[in-house]
């Protein structure tokens, strides 16, 4: 009987040891996440692919296994995938994400936007530290149009919008048309889904106005003019990781926050020149940035 108890005790101890080993190996970094492998997604435009690649390579440099699912589509598709856990990490823009979740929000500064986002996101999701890097949407025109019609702000478009064709990402119309009407009284003649060709379409006259990201180096190289936004339709647009909390651990979160701390607007604009103008591969550009900033 005592031998049986002894055998049972040994078996129990072994079982506990195995359980402990299993728990440790499922989360070898010893933090709050449930997996040592993460899936990173991106939207279907070059800058977001670049940012996702920076996140991926910074994580891999710390020995973290990453699955890359880039160029998936718009926020309308991506949000559902990170919410259901299909994705763990997305490079987001805090103001644009807030506008998607609460189109009536008037938050404009980085702090106010992030505070509002914390209230809007479900408990399964959170934003990590925002980068100083900011990439706003802008309504942009050619210099010739700006000079001819004396355009300096978005408000100046009101008497002319009915004659103008506007372009942007495919989802730009559904996201912003009503907002432009309500805030600035803009009723454009036509909307075209010009995606990453928007800047070029403004230059060649296919469009009179378009949604061009402010880090797009073609604003300078093509001599375009980004109109100011006095009523803050676009608000703060800091690069900000959006994550599914159950899919990340503390080490992975730390890596992403370290990336955000190093990423500024001038640096992002320079990276985008390599991608959009020089046509360098985003993965190679990301690798250089991670290494030069001591993260890889």
Image: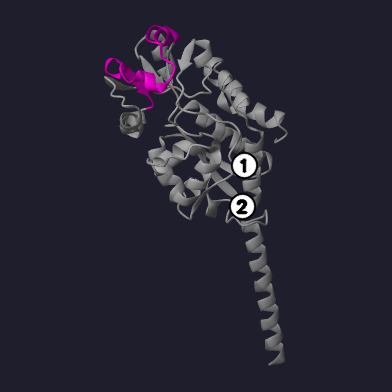
- Of the two numbered discs 1 and 2 on the same chain, state the one appearing first in sequence: 2
Q: What residue is rendered at 66% in x and 66% in y?
A: 20
The residue at which mark 1 appears reads as: 256
User: Few, some or many C-alpha atoms within 10 Å of disc 1 (few <14, some 14-19, many ≥20)?
Assistant: many
Q: Secondary structure at mark 2?
A: loop
| Residue 165 is a magenta residue | yes
- Please give the residue where the numbered disc 2 appears in the rendered image: 249
What residue occupies the far bottom of the structure in this picture? 1
Tell me if I can see residue 194 in this picture: no
Residue 77 in percent (x, y) is at 39, 40
Q: Which mark is residue 110?
A: none
Q: Quadrant of residue 208?
A: top left
> In what quadrant of the picture does the N terminus appear?
bottom right
Which stretch is magenta? Answer: 143-169
* Quadrant assignment, res 283: top right
Expressed as whole percent of the image width and height from the top left, the position of residue 271 reads 60, 23
Query: x, y (%) of residue 143?
Result: 45, 9
Image point (53%, 55%), residue name? 246
* Mark 1: secondary structure: helix
**Closer to us: 19 or 134:** 134
Q: How is the image coloured?
A: one colour
The residue at the point 44 percent across, 41 percent down is 98
Q: Does 247 lie within the magenta span?
A: no
Residue 51 versus residue 272 in the image, above or below: below
Q: Residue at x 63, y 25 (%)?
A: 267
* Image height of 281 relative to 76, above or below: above
18 lies above or below 132? below
Task: From the viewer's perspective, tell me whether residue 141 is left or right of residue 48.
Answer: left
């Amino acid at each position: 009987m005592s031998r049986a108890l002894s055998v049972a005790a040994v078996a129990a101890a072994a079982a506990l040891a195995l359980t402990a080993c299993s728990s440790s190996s499922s989360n070898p970094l010893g933090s709050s996440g449930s997996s040592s492998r993460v899936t990173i997604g991106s939207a279907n435009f070059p800058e977001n692919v670049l940012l996702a690649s920076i996140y991926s390579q910074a994580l891999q440099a710390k020995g973290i296994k990453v699955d890359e699912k880039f160029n998936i589509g718009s926020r309308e598709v991506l949000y559902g995938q990170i919410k259901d856990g299909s994705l763990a990490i997305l490079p987001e823009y805090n103001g644009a994400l807030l506008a998607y979740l609460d189109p009536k929000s008037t938050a404009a500064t980085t702090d106010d936007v992030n505070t509002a986002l914390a209230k809007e996101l479900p408990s399964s999701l959170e934003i990590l530290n925002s980068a100083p890097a900011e990439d706003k949407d802008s309504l942009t025109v050619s210099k010739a149009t700006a000079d001819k019609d004396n355009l300096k702000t978005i408000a100046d478009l009101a008497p002319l919008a009915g004659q103008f064709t506007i372009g942007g990402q495919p989802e730009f119309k559904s996201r912003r048309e009503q907002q432009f009407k309500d805030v600035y009284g803009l009723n454009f003649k036509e909307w075209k889904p010009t995606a990453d060709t928007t800047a070029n379409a403004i230059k060649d006259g296919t469009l009179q106005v378009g949604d061009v990201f402010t880090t797009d180096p073609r604003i300078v190289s093509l001599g375009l003019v980004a109109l100011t936004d006095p009523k803050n339709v676009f608000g703060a647009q800091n690069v900000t990781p959006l994550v599914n909390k159950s899919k990340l651990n503390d080490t992975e979160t730390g890596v992403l926050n370290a990336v955000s701390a190093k990423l500024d607007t001038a640096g992002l604009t320079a990276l985008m020149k390599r991608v959009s103008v020089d046509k360098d591969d985003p993965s190679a550009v990301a690798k250089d940035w991670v290494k030069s900033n001591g993260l890889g």
